Image (cartoon, helix red, strand yellow):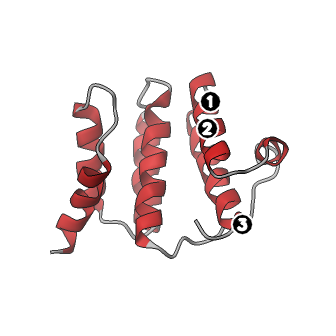
Amino acid sequence: MSTYEEKLSLLSEMIAFARIDGQIHEREYQFLTIVASQLKVEKSVFESLFVHEAKKVVIKSEHQRILQFYRLALLMHADGILHDNEQVAIREMGVNMGLSPFAMRSVLQEMQKSPTGLIDPDVLLALFRAQHN
């Protein structure tokens, strides 16, 4: 992640996604807090994103777009409830990021098969690479 503005944009996007089902579940909030911490965004700035959305910054790196899609997928599973509107929204967001719909579907299927909801980073990248051929 290259700029602070990109980090704030990613967090804003994740907060908006967490609100799709009408509320932010405590486990979703905890997940967002962990991501903000990993991105080295101060707590006060993170909290302000719930009130004022950050400026949208387009992610140029495909690797970073894949990572953001995976973060959104993890967030979608954080509350233990898969809402239809979350599944539609994550697909739309992925397409808007320029990601392969087939790869996204494969990633979401692998996450559902996994007992923890996690997939190996190499598997994640391989699913997207397979669509390049």
| Quadrant housing the C terminus | bottom left
Q: Can residue 70 be seen in this view?
A: yes
Q: Residue at x 62, y 29 (%)?
A: 30
The percent coordinates of residue 22 (x first, y second) are 62, 32
Q: How far apart are marks 3 and 2 (CA)?
A: 18 Å
Left or right? Give the position of 124 relative to 50. left
| Quadrant housing the N terminus | bottom right
Considering the numbered disc 2 on the image, is that residue within a helix, a strand or a loop?
helix
Between 12 and 3, which is closer to the camera in this rendering?
3
Considering the numbered disc 1 on the image, is that residue within a helix, a strand or a loop?
helix
Say which quarter of the image contains residue 53.
Answer: bottom right
Q: Is residue 102 visible?
A: no
Left or right? Give the position of 29 relative to 64. right
Density class for disc 3 (Cα within 10 Å; few <14, some 14-19, many ≥20) is some
Q: In this view, does 53 lie above or below 115?
A: below
| Mark 3 or mark 1: whose residue is earlier in sequence | 3
Amino acid on which disc 3 is placed: Glu
Amino acid on which disc 1 is placed: Gln
Q: In this view, does 118 lie above or below 96?
A: above
Q: In this view, does 15 lie above or below 66?
A: above
Instruction: Identify residue for label 1.
Output: 30
Amino acid on which disc 2 is placed: Ile
Q: Residue at x 60, y 44 (%)?
A: 35
The percent coordinates of residue 74 (x first, y second) are 44, 39
Mark 3 and mark 2 in contact? Answer it, CB < 8 Å. Answer: no
Considering the numbered disc 3 on the image, is that residue within a helix, a strand or a loop?
helix
Say which quarter of the image contains residue 10.
Answer: bottom right
Query: In the rendering, which numbered label is found on residue 5?
Result: 3
Query: In the rendering, which numbered label is found on residue 34?
Result: 2
From the viewer's perspective, is the residue at label 3 or at label 2 nearer? 2
